[in-house]
């Protein structure tokens, strides 16, 4: 073997195509970096916006939570008052049973109405075909 056969052969256009492929690779890397920076900038902007909005609505959210808690307490007191009032006519255990049953029926009706109001769409839980 001679020295020329051990040396890798260069193609004719390698000197032309190598710089082009490097420049293309550099341009792709720069474009990728710009896209990555733009996406990160948008994510940061959305994050700042959401944080700002959360700080703005925090007092309202706390007020709604307190209102829901007080409403639940009020409904419980109304149910207790209904049991006590009904206990004047029937036994205490029977009045508690009647008021509890009425509340369960109201809850079932509200749940059925809520389910009927759901928009039609793909079911998350597969329902077997009825036979």
Image (spheres, grey):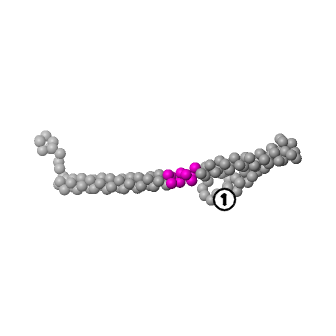
Left or right, 5 with respect to 123, comes to left
Q: Nearer the viewer, residue 58 or 21?
A: 58
Give percent across and percent down for residue 74. Answer: 71, 49
Give percent across and percent down for residue 32. Answer: 33, 54
Give percent across and percent down for residue 17. Answer: 21, 55
Q: Is residue 131 visible?
A: no
Give percent across and percent down for residue 77. Answer: 74, 47
In this rendering, is residue 112 above or below 80? below
Q: Residue furthest right?
A: 89
Q: Which residues are magenta?
A: 54-62
Left or right, 126 with respect to 17, comes to right
Q: Residues within 10 Å of mark 1 (few under 14, many from 20)?
A: few
Q: Nearer the viewer, residue 49 or 77?
A: 77
Numbered-mark total: 1
Q: Quarter of the image holding residue 4?
A: top left
Residue occupying image coordinates x 23% and y 56% = 20
Q: Nearer the viewer, residue 50 or 77?
A: 77
Secondary structure type for disc 1: loop
Q: Which residue is mark 1?
A: 117
Residue occupying image coordinates x 17% and y 54% = 15
Residue occupying image coordinates x 28% and y 56% = 27
Q: Is residue 14 visible?
A: yes
- Dominant SS type (magenta): helix
Residue occupying image coordinates x 50% and y 52% = 54
Left or right, 50 with respect to 114, comes to left
Q: Is residue 55 magenta?
A: yes
What is the quadrant of the N terminus in the image?
A: top left
């Amino acid at each position: 073997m001679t020295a020329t056969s051990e040396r890798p052969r260069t193609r004719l256009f390698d000197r032309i195509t190598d710089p082009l492929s490097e420049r293309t690779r550099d341009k792709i890397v720069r474009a990728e970096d710009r896209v990555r920076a733009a996406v990160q900038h948008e994510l940061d902007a959305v994050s700042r916006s959401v944080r700002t909005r959360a700080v703005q609505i925090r007092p309202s959210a706390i007020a709604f939570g307190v209102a829901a808690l007080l409403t639940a307490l009020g409904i419980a007191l109304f149910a207790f008052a209904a049991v006590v009032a009904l206990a004047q006519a029937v036994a205490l255990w029977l009045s508690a049973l009647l008021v509890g049953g009425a509340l369960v029926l109201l809850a079932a009706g509200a749940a059925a109405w809520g389910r009927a109001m759901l928009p039609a769409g793909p079911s998350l839980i597969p329902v077997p075909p009825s036979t």
